[in-house]
Amino acid sequence: MEMHTRVSLLAIHGIDGRARAPFNIGAWLTRLVNRMQEAGRRRRDYEMLMAKSDHELSDIGLTRADVIAGIKYGRWPTRRGSRG
């Protein structure tokens, strides 16, 4: 059986040797609910923006590709030379 020091556990196996915090079901459920709410918000935003015409989107400085990227990656793409 191979023996390791705390440093070698971290370096070789990525284990720091400390005990893990106990599982907190309340925190896990809170994160799950928050993620589900965020997914619902993104879906509603996507549907609202995609229902607009290309002209309406251009009025607010967006394209359909911007909407897709914003929903998929959680941020709007930046354009070179834009002021903002």
Image (tube, helix red, strand yellow):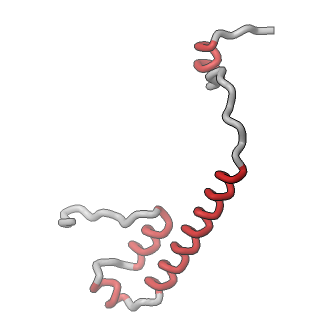
Residue 74 placement (x, y as % from top left): 45, 63
Q: Left or right: 17 with respect to 50?
A: right
Residue 14 picture quarter: top right
Residue 30 picture quarter: bottom right
Q: Residue at x 46, y 72 (%)?
A: 68
Q: Residue at x 43, y 68 (%)?
A: 70
> If the image is split into quadrants, where does the C terminus sit?
bottom left
Residue 33 picture quarter: bottom right
Residue 79 placement (x, y as % from top left): 27, 64
Q: Residue at x 73, y 8 (%)?
A: 3
Closer to us: 46 or 19: 19
Q: Is residue 51 above or below residue 69?
A: below
Residue 1 placement (x, y as % from top left): 81, 9
Q: Left or right: 68 with respect to 5?
A: left
Q: Residue furthest front?
A: 26
Q: Left or right: 39 with respect to 63?
A: right
Q: Residue at x 50, y 66 (%)?
A: 72
Residue 39 placement (x, y as % from top left): 57, 69
